[in-house]
Amino acid sequence: MKKFFLLATFSLAAFLLAFQPAWAFSFAVFGDTQKYKGTKSELGRSVKSLKKYQDIDFLVALGDMCSGKKCEKKLRKWKRIVDTVGVPIYPAHGNHDLVSLEFWNTRFNPPQNGPAGFSGICYSFDFENSHFVVLSTSFTQWHVIDSAQRAWLEEDLAANTKENVFVFFHAPAFPAGIKIANSLDSNPGERDAFWQIIDDHDVTAVFSGHEHIFSRRLIDSTVFPGAKSEIYQFGVGNTDAYPIPALAQSVEYYFRPKSYLVVNVDGTQITTNLYKPRGKLLNSFTFSKNP
């Protein structure tokens, strides 16, 4: 009888595994950690929480991992702490990440398939059923995704065959808090030319940092006149940054204290879970995007 029970249990497990979607995966998003102070900081606690409670495939850092004259030293230490999660790290370049592109590429070894002159700070990669794009809003000009990146982005998205497309960069296109007029919106013509590409290709979701709050905002025709798509913009800007007042205008949800995000992808169903650094779930949100 015991042998039969074990066999039945094994068969059920094998059946469930066989029918589990092959594309189900998760990734974490950290934003603005430049004020961390070692493993006992909120960055360290977020890393510990990820290792203990989450099963992620990779991590995206949305920039401003360091700041000041000792940025290289601080970024080395940041990398040592976050590497303990044991998954690949894909970085976006922030306006406070004042290191050379050579140092950046040596430290992170990101994909090198972006446009000329943007080595390792503008790139894309595929994972399971999804396509991922990382852009720079700080090089060569702050708060601009310039024509060189846009031309590359247009070609990259036109060639994409994956169901989902996720786009990451530091300064948001449509800021919700105190960084209004100090993000991509400070150059509205450049911002609109960029977002038109995002809208035309019906991107699944966009993630940015910079505002030092978490926010969720739907960008549709009421925000971007003439938009054909409805695209969620997630601001993940306070994993371990200094606090600033939060205005949080026109958003569905925002959270000011320290936090990090885990994104679960199951086909075209996307679930975002926001956590405090010690692992307490703050908010869960699910949406679907038709391919």
Image (tube, helix red, strand yellow):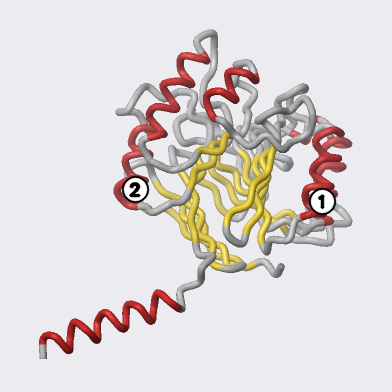
Three-letter amino acid code at the position of disc 2: Gly
**Percent from the top left, x then y, of residue 235?**
59, 43
- Residue at 41%, 33% (x, y): give it: 82
Disc 2 and disc 1 in contact, CB within 8 angstroms? no
Q: Is residue 26 above or below residue 235?
A: below
Q: Which of 176 and 80 is in front in this view?
A: 80
The mark tally for this picture is: 2
Tag 1's secondary structure?
loop
Q: Is residue 229 above or below residue 253?
A: below
- Residue at 67%, 34% (x, y): give it: 112
Tag 2's secondary structure?
loop
**Percent from the top left, x then y, of residue 27?**
50, 50
Q: From the image, tell me which residue sits under label 2.
A: 279
Counting residues from the start of the chain, the first of labels 2 and 1 encountered is 1
Q: From the image, tell me which residue sits under label 1.
A: 224
Three-letter amino acid code at the position of disc 1: Phe
**Identity of the residue furthest to the left in this view:** 1
Quarter occupied by residue 210: top right
